[in-house]
Image (spheres, rainbow, N blue to C red):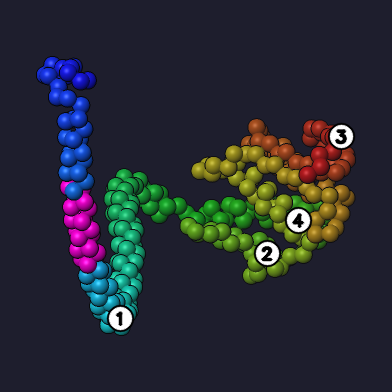
Amino acid sequence: MAGGDCFLCHQHLPPEPVIEGLGTVRLRFECDRLTGELKEAYELASVLDRDIAKHTAAVAADEAALQEIENELTPARQAVAAVAQAEISEIDMALGKASERLRQLERVNAALELETELTDRILDLEQQIAPVQDRVDEAIRSIDFGAAAGRLEDGMNAYLEALNQLRPDVWRHSAVRVDVSRREVTMRVGNRRWSTALGGTDSLYFLMAYHYGLLSLGDKAGCHYPGLAIIDVPGEFSGEAIEDKENFIVQPFIDLLARKEFEGAQLIITGASFTGLAGVHYQRLHHVHVA
């Protein structure tokens, strides 16, 4: 722009050769400045390289020293670890034992609490039972067990005597003896227990005599037998067929219940035949029930 003005600041511009000279000076100045800065940068980089090398050497030395220390500490660490592991195991075992002991104590405590509760309940029930027990004891003391045994004994022997009247000498054993106590009832034939003294058919007669003796108590004062007997006579007893004995063993019951004092008493008995029995009600069963 010879002879012109600057479009930005609107100042008058010098001639063109003067501008070109100023530009060359400016470039030489910038080149010298940049060359100096580059040299300074190289020097700075050299210093940094020396510092890096120095620090690298220091780090390597420190690592070597650290490794040496680690090597020296390894035996000590192993010894400490072994001791610590043993102590930890012992502590774990002690904790386990203590925990189990605590659980046992908790169970024992629960059992003791339950025992205490049950003891209190038992004491309460005993206090409630005591008046009743006194009356029961008094009633038991007033019971004549000998008389009760005698009544049952008389009834059983009456049945066996009735069998001998129907068939002479069918019962060839001694009379039945009954002993009654507060805790047990013992039945003997003579001086021997009935189960060892009797065979198959005689055992059948004995058991029927027992039912007869109980049924005969129905008209006795103070006896609470309900006047009802239910007997299921098997087809065989101890390996012997008893069809031909059915009428014979039932007849004493029929004669007993025919008495006026046994009106209302009842005997229900099942069997295979019962042919020709008088004074009884028959109910024939045709359906076979298989067990």
Q: Which residues are magenta?
A: 33-52
Give percent across and percent down for residue 218. Answer: 60, 41
The disc, 2 or 4, on the residue closer to the chain's N-terminal end is: 2
Name the residue beneath numbered marker 1: 71
Q: Main secondary structure of the magenta part?
A: helix
Q: Secondary structure at mark 4?
A: helix
Q: Which mark is residue 194?
A: 2
Q: Secondary structure at mark 1?
A: helix
**Which amino acid is tagged 3?**
His
The disc, 1 or 2, on the residue closer to the chain's N-terminal end is: 1
Say whether residue 57 is magenta: no
Circle nearer the viewer, 1 or 2? 1
Give percent across and percent down for residue 54. Answer: 22, 70
Name the residue beneath numbered marker 4: 204
- Asked if residue 92 can be seen in this view, the reply is yes
Mark 1 → mark 2, Cα distance in angstroms: 98 Å
Circle nearer the viewer, 3 or 1? 1
The disc, 3 or 1, on the residue closer to the chain's N-terminal end is: 1
Mark 1 → mark 4, Cα distance in angstroms: 102 Å
